[in-house]
Image: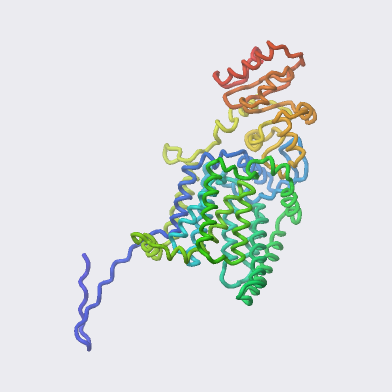
Amino acid sequence: MDQPAVRSVGRGGPRSTPSIPPRSVVAPPSVPAVVFILLAVLVPLGLQQPLLNSDGDLARHLRHGRYMLEHGGLIHTDPFSFTRHGAPFVGFEYGSQLLYALAEQIGGLAGVTILAGLLIGLAYALVTRFLIRRGVDPLLAYLTTVLAAVVGVGHWVARPHLFSFVAVIVLLDLLERRAPTRVLPFVVLFIVWANLHGGFIFGWILIAIYLFGSVGEMLLGNARDHWKSMVGYYAKALAAAIGATLLNPHGLALHRHVIDFLGEQYIFDNTSEFMSPDFHELGAKLFLVVLLGCIAALGLKGSRPTLPRLLLLCAGTGFGLLAVRNMSLFGLTALPVLALHVDDAWRRLPDPGGVRGRFEQTAGRTSTLPWVLPVVVLLCGLALAHGRLGRLQLIDNRFDATVFPLAAVAKARNAHLEGNLFSEFAWGGYLIYAWPEQKIFIDGGTDFFGEEVFRGYSTIKRLSPGWRDVLKKWGISLILLRRESALTHELARDAVWNLWYCDSLAVVLRPSADTLAVTPAMADSAEHALNGCAKQSSGPLSDSHQ
């Protein structure tokens, strides 16, 4: 029961001391805490399939990380392919690869999924925190974060770029500080960033945008003294950021490697994530809707943003239209900056039912760490259990057998097949992960393989003129392909190749002992075997099927 108010008598006569309401043990979760908890929990549970299986790059990163842990050092020459075996290798993602490999050692692939969820949750929680700390209405901050997640979700895969998501919003926070501060935070950030992922180049671009925008405000705006000081601040920050990235094991070779790769136009033009959005697809349509909403918000606001923010909005839009993978960066940079600009206009909008007011009032009496910390601990415990809760496997601990050729690789490896292996591009990373002793033609690390090998792969896979010559040039003696591909059906009808293994997903082909002229009956027989293999139990075909 509540204690009665205590009556006391003083010189002014009787007065009552109001009772003190009991304090709750923990305040409600803050908006950033809600964002973090929702994403850190729901992403590993609900999006584990795309997190692990969108392409073969995660498996490649895990193999690279394992290799470094096993050998106690960085990879300096390629040990995984026959097309570039022994060539100098620059591991521009080595730090994140090590962290993912450690997560796998501790928690299996479920641990990797949980780490990816934590990074995604942290990045978008920082977006919300960034806006609220700068006085943006909490409801607007939350809705901005939701839109940022909507345009970025297509690139939520467990790969090194998730570390750049976090670094980008930390950098934006430094750039948007109201008064110049020391540049030491830039030094620390870029040392860490350069040793995790090559996205630090985008960090340079962000600082340069703020620098040139500040120069424009200094020359054209009113508060020239303020912007003059900001020019000096951003110039020092850019110099510090560039210098800090030299503190990596590769030195200048890291910068040359990343910058040279940005000039590989053929690779960029033929890799899906580097292509422009296809606005007939759902993800691109959502991006277009958000982009049009941004244009409308700028028009309705009336006044222009500061030039640094305006340049960032333009650059973010341009990057997002150039490549699918950049849509997430648009959400993490352009949208928060737009929210800063329109916040005062947002607050003048009607508030039916007082929703915005109640949201803001509640957001002022919240806590973060008491909510976030237990969730992190629970997720780490789930990782230690390899994604299991009792008998229930909450998070997958293996790659998807309908996406990667698990059965085909297991059979071929058990049979000790050897040879120069040509495979699907997206399977290259999985092959070095699951069959490390087998040398591959190419994997998703096109920055390393370069245009010549990538063109060779494209020529073979697309059955372009001269594709058989490319097979001969590289001495291909083992082929692993999707059963449904045109190349598979072409090779199955070719007397040079025998169908050694087939299941509903993949086929393994090996050279025939003798090269014979192909008769229609032979071609029809091979085609029949290929079409029928999905209906039978997976395994090597008998001699009669060969």
In the rendered image, residue 180, in percent from the top left (x then y), is placed at 61, 72
Choose between 251 and 349: the one closer to the eye: 349
Choose between 7 and 240: the one closer to the eye: 240
Q: Quadrant of the C terminus?
A: top right
Residue 100 in the image: above or below residue 168:
above
In this view of the protein, can residue 363 be seen by the observer? Answer: yes
Residue 534 in the image: above or below residue 157:
above
Q: Quadrant of the N terminus?
A: bottom left
Report the residue that reaches farthest toward the bottom. 11
In the rendered image, residue 404, in percent from the top left (x then y), is placed at 59, 32
Give the colouring mode of the picture.
rainbow
In this view of the protein, can residue 369 be seen by the observer? Answer: no
> Which residue corresponds to the image point at 55% horizontal and 18% vertical from the top-left?
536
Residue 248 in the image: above or below residue 414:
below
Choose between 127 and 545: the one closer to the eye: 127
Q: Quadrant of residue 64?
A: top right
> Which residue corresponds to the image point at 65% horizontal and 72% vertical from the top-left?
218
Residue 504 in the image: above or below residue 170:
above
In the rendered image, residue 69, in percent from the top left (x then y), is placed at 65, 46
> Which residue corresponds to the image point at 54% horizontal and 40% vertical from the top-left?
50
